[in-house]
Image (cartoon, coloured by chain):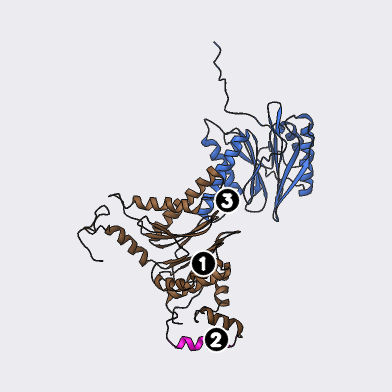
Amino acid sequence: MTKEHANWSPYDNNGGTCVAIAGADYCVIAADTRMSTGYSILTRDYSKISKLADKSFMASSGFQADVKALQKVLSSRHLIYQHQHNKQMSCPAMAQLLSNTLYYKRFFPYYAFNVLGGLDSEGKGCVFTYDAVGSYERVGYSAQGSGATLITPFLDNQLKSPSPLLLPAKDAVTPLSEAEAVDLVKTCFSSATERDIYTGDSVEIIILNANGVRRETEQLRKD
Amino acid sequence: MFRNQYDTDVTTWSPAGRLFQVEYAMEAVKQGSAAIGLRSKTHVVLACVNKANSELSSHQRKIFKVDDHIGVAIAGLTADGRVLSRYMRSECINYGYTYESPLPVGRLVVQLADKAQVCTQRSWKRPYGVGLLVAGLDESGAHLYYNCPSGNYFEYQAFAIGSRSQAAKTYLERKFEKFPESSRDDLVKDALFAIRETLQGEKLTSSVCTIAVVGVGEAFNILDQETVQALINEFEISGEEAPTNESAAEQAGGDADSAPDQSGAAAEGEAAPMDI
């Protein structure tokens, strides 16, 4: 009495890892650039990060076709918002929109594991972390994707922010400086690359602060 | 036009082959405050007169950004204009989503025209009471179209709609031959002069008009009040003669002192700036 299984799946996992860290006046969003399928590499140079608004960047691992579709939907919705309100969406507003968009497909989900990073209306860093169907939470830092289990415990230890597992929930923005946070992210990815076969090639790092946006790339092991 | 027995329904023809309701809708456009558009090979400028009902109220928005490469100025029932702008924005967003490229202007105006035509052939609808000047840029260059309530549309080098637009049209007819090669700033200057024509002697200030530009390397944007006022002052437009081609050269050659004297004399004379 075994259940009959489908001989075709609409989903594929393209692997990869995403991380975001919120600081007092900055936000770091990073993702590796390797795209895989099964045990093969499709490309070493694919960006998983998308700019949703001036102050909101989304990094997504999982099924990149769904990620691309999700990015396009959010982009179009943001255009509509700008026409109606004559301004850009704030990061918390975009966070809610992403959640609603994901839940809209509750019964045929976007296979996307997202982490949204940006600056809130006070200029403080904010990071939101999601599951595939839109459950989300504002946190001080987060990792998603194939290397998440390797990175998260390291960040818990190194970021010196109050643990997100404590109750009552504390504002978990890290006291580290921007340079220290970027350095930590590079260390995270180097370590994850060692043990996770789906993470590597290079890491794309976006740093958002009051002065604007900066982009850095760091090479990782290609094996 | 007078009331007659064929003008109650949009679906009733008159014996002369006219649809009076559609023509009445075009009258609504003529009653609205003026909007003008003009284009060169690389830029399109839209300008409109923004008169508030009273000092206490705000101005009505008559120019809308539809997409980075398309904008529209309206004359007539502004509510209808707002609804059509929303439709145009939606079409641009959907096209961009599907094709990851900007909607060609010619396609958009056809869709708009077809939408207007529907309202001329349904007994339960009425025609849109708004005329739209659609300015846009696409692969085939800069375009300016006029969409009527009748469902017709035409492409123009320059056009004016709304009340007292004939004065602006006369000015544009004199100048349009040099528009294709005009620079962006010259186009804006001509737009301001054309607006001044419709004001028939009233002082041209940035609180009375709105200017928007779209062009190669410049996304559609509405110029802010300070910029417009600075341009008006720079061109010394506010109460003075619109320079003809000959006197423009003279003024450019002369110094600042002679210009106010010339204009003072002209203002005291006949108030018909079209007389050269």
Name the residue tied to disc 1. B211
Q: Is residue A109 visible?
A: yes
Chain containing the residue with disc 3: A
Give the percent coordinates (x, y) of residue B198.
43, 73
Q: CA distance from mark 1 to mark 2?
A: 26 Å
Looking at the rendered structure, the kind of residue marked 1 is Ile
At 48% across and 51% down in the image, what residue appears? B89
Q: Is residue B58 visible?
A: no
Q: CA distance from mark 2 to mark 3?
A: 49 Å
What's the magenta region? B256-276
At 57% across and 47% down in the image, what residue appears? A93
Nearer the observer, disc 3 or disc 1?
A: 1
Name the residue tied to disc 3. A89
Asked if residue A198 lies left or right of residue B64, the reply is: right
Asked if residue B235 lies left or right of residue A164, the reply is: left
Q: Which chain corresponds to the colour brown?
A: B
- Residue B186 part of the magenta-drawn span: no
Q: Which chain corresponds to the colour blue?
A: A
Name the residue tied to disc 2. B260
